[in-house]
Image (cartoon, grey):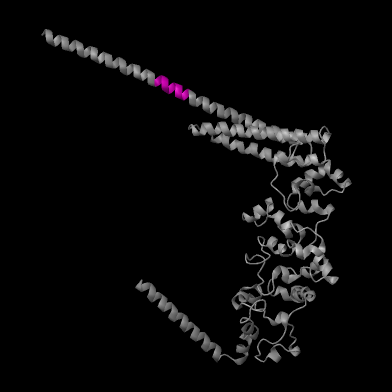
Amino acid sequence: MTSRMQYRGAAAGGASLTALIALGVLLSSPPSLRAQNKNTCIDCHKQLDPPLGIDPARYAASIHGQKGIRCTACHGGDDSSDDIDKSMGKGAGFRGNIDRAKIPALCASCHSNAAYMRGFNPSVRTDEFSQYQTSVHGKLLAKGDTWVAVCTDCHTAHEVYAPNDPRSSVYPTNVAQTCSRCHASAAYMKRYKIPVNQFALYSTSVHHAALAGGDLSAPTCTTCHGSHGAAPPGVPSVENVCSTCHVFQAQLFDAGPHKDAFAAMSLPSCITCHSNHGIQHPTDAMIGAGPQAVCVKCHSAGEPGAIAAAAMHGQLAKLDAAIARSDDILGQAERAGMEVSAAKLAQGDAREDLIKARVAIHQVQPQAVDQDVQAGLEVTGKTWQAGLAALAERRYRREGLLVSLVAIAWVLIALGLLIRKIESKGTGTTKET
């Protein structure tokens, strides 16, 4: 305890000494340097309550604070002067509460200047403002609608962090929550007459589950709608958006009969079956004629489409059951101490075939699904036999052990009887003598 207190005392003394040295350096430095480090904006606003209050430490931790971007870069004025008429005077170009309609152009004065931005990051993009002008938000703002999102609504104003910083409001795991500030508010979105349940639906989706589980590549709002150029995907472009991730499924869909049929009915391809924001993990129950099936939305019983759907569902169910059956018997054999690792490894091939078959349904061709199913059934047939053989070997070993034990027991009994007989003879001989 004493040494710990001594260490703390020494640390405190060192910190005090460091502070005194820093103060001495500052006081002995030229007035121009002291003026440069001075920031009357922060000195004043750190004493105010929100929304005018600024936390100096949090601003210093922001990307602007880290790069040395001062308050005057956006608000103008002179932050080195204690004279309020100078620091906040019109002559110094001071602008306090910036008009929302002017915020995108103000941010673009730096962020669209490629030469200026390269000084901070040579690879940073500088087309955000031009993209914003093509977005739904930007177009409405140009028409005078100041209710739409501008830069500070998504990135905040004074605590802007880099997009790859978990503290950032546009970090992948925070994007949906940021968008929901407007899009989940019925009162705010009432004027636009659009749904406000997107965030609630997305929170139940397989995409959100993957993102919350740590997969930062999982889709969030900006993945499908864009960020600065945000726009709702139109019906013809939905497939293109989904195919940026689900490439193979899109290729199969294009090769099947649904592509032209959906186009003729002006139906969006992917979301007709999978929905949009509340996309759930797909299951085999979505195929066929059950209560969870999506096929029945368009196909009635007895129609070719319904028959094909039922056939594909049956094929998937058959392979799934075969895999489960082999897993069960291999599990029994393994618990009995039999070596079945090779067969269990082969089960992975069957599962892969089942995945392929489930993907193949996007082509809506039963024969294509059956091709993968048959490959999987061939594997499960062998693994099932391997399980049966392992259990048969176990029974053979047990029976052999039982026979051996019985034989050993008989030998021991016979030896015991023989010994007793020999001993009895010896005793009789001794008495006669």
Along the horizontal axis of the image, is 270 left or right of 43?
right
Q: Quadrant of residue 51?
A: bottom right
Question: What number of labels is visible?
Answer: 0
Q: Which residues are magenta?
A: 396-404
Residue 172: % across, % down? 67, 61
Among all residues in the image, which is located at the extreme top? 432
Instruction: Give 304 or 415, whichever is nearer the viewer.
Output: 304
Q: Can residue 357 be seen?
A: yes
Residue 117: % across, % down? 72, 74
Task: Examine the rendered structure and indicate whether residue 293 appears above or below residue 143.
Answer: above
Q: Quadrant of residue 289?
A: top right
Residue beneath the point at 81% across and 65% down:
191
**Residue 17: in magenta span:** no
Residue beneath the point at 12% across and 7% down:
432
Residue 123: % across, % down? 71, 68
Residue beneath the point at 74% across and 63% down:
185
**Residue 397: in magenta span:** yes
In the rendered view of the protein, which quadrant contains the N terminus? bottom left
Instruction: Give 217 or 40, whichever is nearer the viewer.
Output: 40
Task: Examine the rendered structure and indicate whether residue 408 appears above or below residue 136.
Answer: above
Q: Quadrant of residue 39?
A: bottom right
Q: Can residue 219 be seen?
A: no
Task: Examine the rendered structure and indicate whether residue 189 appears above or below residue 103.
Answer: above
Among all residues in the image, which is located at the extreme right? 264
Along the horizontal axis of the image, is 186 left or right of 60?
right
Which SS type dominates the magenta stretch?
A: helix
Residue beneath the point at 68% across and 81% down:
71
Instruction: Give 153 or 181, whichever is nearer the viewer.
Output: 181
Residue 285: % across, % down? 71, 39
In the rendered view of the protein, which quadrant contains the C terminus? top left
Among all residues in the image, which is located at the extreme left? 433
